[in-house]
Image: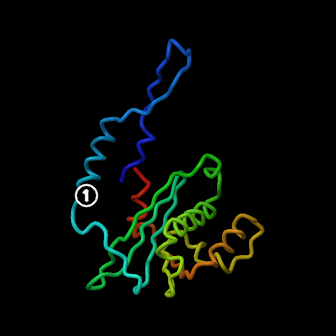
Amino acid sequence: MVNPATDGPKIRLFHEQSGKKTEYRKMGEKMTKDEGMLREETACAPVLAAPNFFLPFKLEVDASATGAGAVLLQDGEGGVCHPVCYFSTKFKRHRLNYSRIEKETLAMLLTLQHFEVYVGSSSSPVTVYTDHNPLVFLSQMYNHNQRLMHWALLAQGYNLDIKHKRGVDNVVADALFRG
C-alpha cells in the first residue's frame, strides 16, 4: 500500500558551524495522502483477528526486487480467512543482488522468524502460500548454492506445508511492500 517514509525525497542542509552536510527525509504530499488512506483502511472493522492457537495458521509470503511482505492468516467463522499480523521489510543493500529464489526463500524465513511466537511451536502444519513455484520444492532440491542449502535446513525446523499461489491471487502479501 505505502512505501516506507524512508523513500521520500531528501533535503540537504548545510550547517555553517560544523561545516557538515546532513540529509533529511521530507514527507511528500503523496506520502501524506497514502498515509491517511492507510489509517482509514486499518481503522475499519475487522482489521485483525485474535489468534486461536488451536487452529492452524496460514502465511502468504511474497518478495520483490527490493523487499518482502507477508500476512499471517487464520480461518474464522464461516471459513473466512482473517489476518492476525502483517510483516513487511526492505532488503538491505547486499540482499538486492540475490537471485529470485533466494529473495523468495529469504522472505519466507524472515517471515517465519518474525512470526516465531505464532508458528514456532505449532503442532499443526503452517500452510505457506507463495507465488514462486520452485519454493514448493525447497526441501527436495539438490542445490550447489550454499545459501539455499542453509536456508532449507533452517526451514526444516518448522512444520510447513508450502503451496503455490498465483501472483495475481497473492494480493495481500504483494500490497504490503509495493507502493
Q: Nearer the viewer, residue 155 or 142?
A: 155
Q: Nearer the viewer, residue 29 or 122?
A: 122
- Locate residue 155, reporting x and y percent: 62, 74
Decide: is 134 above or below 32. below
The N terminus is located in which quarter? Answer: bottom left
Give the residue number, with chain letter if any, for mark 1: 41
Amino acid beneath label 1 = Glu
Q: Residue at x 64, y 58 (%)?
A: 99
The colour scheme applied to this rendered structure is rainbow
Is 81 placed left or right of 121 in the picture? left
- Mark 1, other Cα within 10 Å: few <14 / some 14–19 / many ≥20: few
Q: Residue furthest top?
A: 16
Q: Quadrant of residue 120?
A: bottom right
Q: Nearer the viewer, residue 137 or 83?
A: 83
* Image mark count: 1
Is 128 placed left or right of 99 in the picture? left
Decide: is 30 above or below 82. above
Q: Residue at x 62, y 64 (%)?
A: 101
- Locate residue 152, reporting x and y percent: 67, 73
Decide: is 97 above or below 127. above
As helix, strand or loop, the secondary structure at mark 1 comes to: helix
Q: Quadrant of residue 134?
A: bottom right
- Locate residue 17, reporting x and y percent: 52, 12
- Locate residue 144, reporting x and y percent: 78, 68
Q: Residue at x 56, y 52 (%)?
A: 91
Q: Residue furthest right?
A: 144
Q: Residue at x 40, y 70 (%)?
A: 169
Is 119 placed left or right of 26 in the picture? right
